[in-house]
Amino acid sequence: MITTIADTRPNRLTQTKDEKYHLSWGRYAIWAGYNNPIHTLWINRVLTHEQFYIGNQWFIQEDIENFLKDESGDVRNRLQVRMNMIRKIMMEYIGNASRMTLNAEAFSVSPLTKTRRDEQLAKMLFQTELARKVPVFADAIREKTGVGKTNKETEQIFDNVYVDKFVEALNYLMQYIAQINDLESLQPFIAEQIGLSGLGVLMDYEYAGEQRFKAIQSKDFFWDRNSRDYALQNDCQFQGHFDYMAPPQIYEMYPHLSEEQRLVVESYDKRQPAATSVGYQQNVSRNGVPVANVYWRDTEPQEFGYVINEYGDTVFKRINHTPEGEKRPTYTDKDLIDPTNTYESRRRMRGKKSVTIYPDVIRYVRFVPYQAAPDQSPQDRKPDLVLEYGVMPYQEANNEKYNTVPFPYKTYCWSYINGEVRSPLEDAIDSQRFVNRVLSVVDEQIRNTGGSGPIVDSSVFLTTEEEMDAKRDMQHGRPVSIDARGRGIQNVVGQYDMNPKNGLMNMFNILEAIKGLTQYTIGTNEAMQGQSMGQDQLVGVTELMIQRGSLLQEPFYNAVTKIFMQAYQSMAVRGKKIYIDNPNDLTIAVGDAAAKVISLSKDMEIEDFRVSVKRANAQEELHRAADAMLLQLLQLGLIDQRHFGNLFGRSTPDQVAAAIREYSKERQVMAKMQMQQQQAQSQQQMALFQQMNQQQQQNILDERNDKHLVQAQKHVNDLEKIEAKAQAASTYPKAAQQKIVP
């Protein structure tokens, strides 16, 4: 157990944010979070759950003293039998979580998004109108632009195919980050940790110009116990975790360490905490040097006021601040204007032109907290070894909530009541202990009992030899002659039955009842585990049982989903910032075109993104999505009845996409054939024209050509104007509107 002395929380408004300040925060967080009595009890429960999970289920002192020993303290003749229901429960949780498909999709919250969409729709509607007014070129226009025959049809096509270029590029980036981190493989680990502890922890960090994620064991994580947020974010003041590292790892990461500092690491590595009973103490031996990583909400005074941006909009912005990479402040005192007469402006400004606000900033410290060994004196105490500290790079702040910067940890609790995290396994531990005790009694009874047989009063035998002969005869089932000496034979011969079958049957009935009660409590049953419910099971009952169990397990899978939703949100905000600063990696990740779009968003302060994550069974989700696509494509005429019938109910989106490509090729072939037919018809018409009077023919041609030429030229000119306007708008050098950014 890592211990620190009691300390008060450092003053965040202090002007000196040096190494001493950061170390004070780190030690305070360990004392207030990790050494918190509530946290210690929680860790002990987690360790207990781990032992039950791996099969070590006979370590609780109550079971040892009251069950395995008798009243005199002697060990009973009982085996420590266990039927591991806990592992079965955990395997169901982990298996279902591994099978979950999490579909993440980014969307823009920038006001420019609607502008870009409307402009693209207007362009397609113009092409539709152009094709309608110039029938000669209609087929060619529709084939080239993909518009419909009517405005309504074009709008339907547009709604299905339009994707904002910024959103599309960011989705590419998220897919790349998820792929290089193999994010899907972390789902079973997160599910396991939530099952064992009630809490899952995923951490993101920057490494070599890329965003990385790693799963943290819950028992190594600590946080502000005053928080009441299930995600441990909004009202949490600090978070942290311990890494257990070998000295060579520390030296590789921090080559600047002096010889004296390395000696501190080596001395720490040699100390081992006292061994204790697993499941009762927090200080279970861990290999390696404990390195504390502590993050907390800090603040820095910043001057804000109302200014006019380059688009003429009144915005509340930071002034006298030079952004990173710039040579001069974006806005100064000279740009300040009198605030608008709104409630928000009056609340903020109170009649002043500028105000000082204190937005969030995440600071961190990474250090080796010194912990004296039991045999060391206070004089031997060495200082804590600070490895690094400062402001966390690539803050995940968004443009709407500048005072709620997320921590690098993505966390969520299965149950979190009054600062106490609860695990779904807690309700099953007592049941497991009871089952183990019953099975041990059953084993004891089977080993210490026999079958049935006759009982004979040994006094009826005249000699020992006669008694032995009688026993042999009884063992072989032969008749036995007995001298009852005047007593009735019924008083001499009887029958005994030591078979415990009736008692055992009662015990097994109890076990089944406990098993059913446990399944009901945690939200599982045979149907959810894929077991047959029998031929006599009513139709729909199995599905009902699965649904009922799924509802009880929903908080568990919701916790898993929430953690990965935070991870994808971090990709959309923090990850974007990391890759923008590393353009080569960005190009590798998403390609040249998308990289340019993402880089453009750096200068567009209001180009902000959010992420939605939907969860579904992989195969079911694929079929459902494919069927929805097929219905829509059939209505739009983008697929024919033959392909629809072949694919509906049995296809995936990839198969639908392949069918669309196939049908598109077929349409192209048909269109080419139609064009050839039209050309042949035109040639025939020209031959007929040539048979007419030359002057009459010339007059007709001149009249038609003049009319069509004028109309076509007009439409072409209009089209060129719109395309030029759309091209100019697509550059977006700056945002049309601005929001508050720290």
Image (cartoon, rainbow, N blue to C red):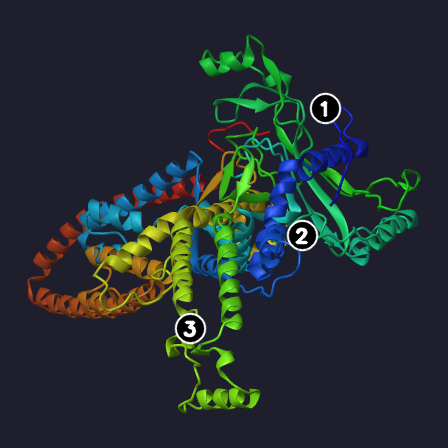
Residue marked by disc 2:
207
Q: Which class describes the residues within 10 Å of circle 2: few (<14), some (14-19), or many (20+)? A: few
Q: How far separated are the C-alphas under marks 2 and 3?
A: 74 Å
Q: Is residue 160 above or below residue 468?
A: above
Residue marked by disc 3:
497
Q: How far separated are the C-alphas under marks 1 and 2?
A: 31 Å
What SS does tag 1 mark?
A: loop
Q: 698 and 174: which one is in front?
A: 174
Q: As drawn, is 147 to the left or to the right of 598?
A: left
Q: 572 and 59: which one is in front?
A: 59
Residue at (44, 91) in percent of width and height: 476
Q: Amino acid at mark 2?
A: Tyr
Query: Can you give x and y, in whole percent of width and height, for residue 7 in the image?
Result: 75, 29
Numbered-mark total? 3
Query: Can you give x and y, in whole percent of width and height, for residue 651 in the image?
Result: 30, 66
Mark 2 or mark 3: name the one nearer the start of the chain. Answer: 2
Which label sits on residue 11?
A: 1
The outermost residue toward the left is 692
Which label sits on residue 380?
A: none
Quarter of the C terminus within the rendering: top right
Q: How far separated are the C-alphas under marks 1 and 3?
A: 80 Å
What SS does tag 2 mark?
A: strand
